Image: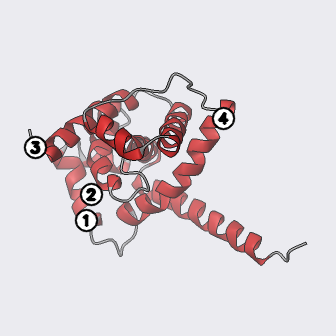
Amino acid sequence: MSDSTNQEAVLASQIQTLVELSEDDLFRKLGIQVKQAEEADAAQLEAAQANGAFAEPAEIEMGLGKDLRAFGARWWAEIEPKLYNLLCSSESSERSQILAQLPAAKGGTATAVVGGDSGNAAADNIATALAPLLIGLLPFNLPIIASVGATIAAKMILSSGLKTTCDMWQESIEAREAAKAKTEAKPAE
């Protein structure tokens, strides 16, 4: 089995588990995996995950307690613009390739991409197509982080449709940029 085939199998396996989780649980899972990557040897985690490891640490709260979900949501803010650029930006050279790949290659339908199908199978199809694209775009080259991000995105797309999801992502990105500009413009006290 080639490395890319193995990675695709690992991603597909992770996503099958992740699509069953709620959005809150997905953000918490994202927080756990990023925190684990920050505190451990990322190369070691990457090697373990490349072989299918999907374990959570024994100290699951990792010093964050209830803030673990919020920590994951903050990391989502890093993933969201990358997904927006891939799926929503008319300037994306990959956009049409990605959208063409979603319905046909993964056994889904065109309605799954635009929001007509709300089942976990459709979320699985979309997330499985997106996850490999995210791996190289994220700070940690870890399949599980890409799998969680892709699953969150897939569930959003199925819940609201691609156009509405793109509009929500754009509003969210613009709001963060405006808040950042406002913070940077404040004079030091």
Q: Residue 101 location, x and y as percent?
A: 20, 53
* Total labels drawn: 4
Q: Residue 140 location, x and y as percent?
A: 41, 51
Question: Along the line of sight, which residue is nearer the eye, 74 or 127?
Answer: 74
Q: Residue 65 location, x and y as percent?
A: 67, 30
Tag 2–tag 1 contact (CB < 8 Å):
yes
From the image, state whether disc 3 or disc 1 is nearer to you. Answer: 3
Give the distance between the C-alpha atoms of the residues marked 3 and 2, in whole angstroms: 26 Å
Tag 3–tag 2 contact (CB < 8 Å):
no
Say the numbered circle drawn on residue 99: 2
Residue underneath mark 3: 2
Question: Along the line of sight, which residue is nearer the eye, 78 or 41?
Answer: 41
Residue underneath mark 1: 96
From the image, state whether disc 2 or disc 4 is nearer to you. Answer: 4
Query: What amino acid is labelled 4 in the image?
Result: Leu
Residue sitting at x 8%, y 38%: 1
From the image, state whether disc 3 or disc 2 is nearer to you. Answer: 3
Question: Along the line of sight, which residue is nearer the eye, 41 or 65?
Answer: 41
Label whose residue precedes the other's in the sequence (3 or 4): 3
Residue 135's place in the image compared with 24, above or below, is below
Query: What amino acid is labelled 1 in the image?
Result: Ser
Instruction: Describe residue 128's horizontal placement relative to residue 17 as left or right.
Output: left
